[in-house]
Image (cartoon, rainbow, N blue to C red):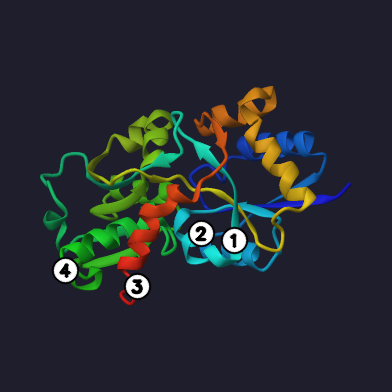
Amino acid sequence: MPILRFGLTPVFLNNDIQLLDTLKVFLEAATGHSVELVTRRTYQEVTSLLVSGQLDAAWICGYPYIQYRDDLELVAIPAWNGKPYYQSYLIVAAGRDAETIMDLRDDIHAFSDPDSNSGFLVTRTLMFEHSLVPDDFFRKTLFTYGHRNVIRAVASNLAQSGSVDGYVWEVMLELEPELVSQTRVLRRSKWLGFPPIATSRAMAGTAKTRVLQKALLEMAANPQGREVLDLLRLTGFEMPREAEFDGIADMVARLRGVL
């Protein structure tokens, strides 16, 4: 049986054994391939494996997709609450008296990953608009390499503020209310393209990629697929459109030469 290597970036449920097992079972049944789920600590590691052809496809972030757009092709995009969009949240402690990013001066600020749209790029763009430089504005910045870790850092006061995936924050509020309720959302970004499934240009159009795309697009109609979607709190997968990532591309263009 041919092997399909599917990469996963460090999102909040990647260490959930039930999810990984359920996803693997679904993909193997739906594609007819033996599936190897490949996880790494950073977005860059997964993106590098994908671009170099060492993965057949991967669930990546919109920011690295834009960075490597010439080397990648979209396969599918998740729908959350019926739409292929999400937001970046700027979060602080629940009881903190702060209203705008300007109130966060001298914070220890937790970012998720340097290649994360919601966990870095959106806040960096906001700061650029206010002529702010992270190393000067914040007392310290750190990368937690996981959105769940950003929430934990702010909830425990290891950081006074953080940049996090709004989808992750909302789902974790449902799954771990005692933790997440110790934080609050200071600012929500505009709606941006949800982290997509992508493949390398070299793998685009291959039998593996086509069968994976079909499995994802039909996931909501499959009982096993529905179980995976329920665990992820997603409504399904859709055919992606380049225009869904225009907002992220605009931020990357504006920060060119700054990052």
Is any atom of residue 216 visible in this view? yes
Residue type at tag 1: Leu
Name the residue at the right extreme: 1
Residue 38 appears in which quarter of the rendering?
Answer: bottom right
- Residue on which the image places disc 2: 65
Residue named by callout 4: 131
Q: CA distance from mark 2 to mark 1?
A: 7 Å
Distance in Å between CA atoms under marks 4 and 1: 33 Å
Of the two numbered discs 3 and 2 on the same chain, state the one appearing first in sequence.
Answer: 2
Residue plotted at (30% across, 67% down): 254
Going from N to C along the chain, the mark reached first, 2 or 1, is 2
* Earlier-in-chain disc, 4 versus 3: 4
Report the front residue among 220 and 204.
204
Q: Amino acid at mark 3?
A: Arg
Q: Secondary structure at mark 2?
A: helix
**Which numbered disc covers residue 72?**
1
Residue at 77% x, 39% y: name it: 31
Q: Is residue 174 left or right of residue 72?
A: left
Q: Give the amino acid type for the residue marked by disc 4 in the picture.
A: Ser
Q: Does residue 236 appear left or right of residue 125 in this picture?
A: right
Badge 2, how many Cα within 10 Å: few under 14, some, many 20+?
many
User: Mark 3 = which residue?
Assistant: 256
Question: Can residue 111 be seen by looking at this rendering?
Answer: no
What is the secondary structure assignment of the residue under circle 4? Answer: loop
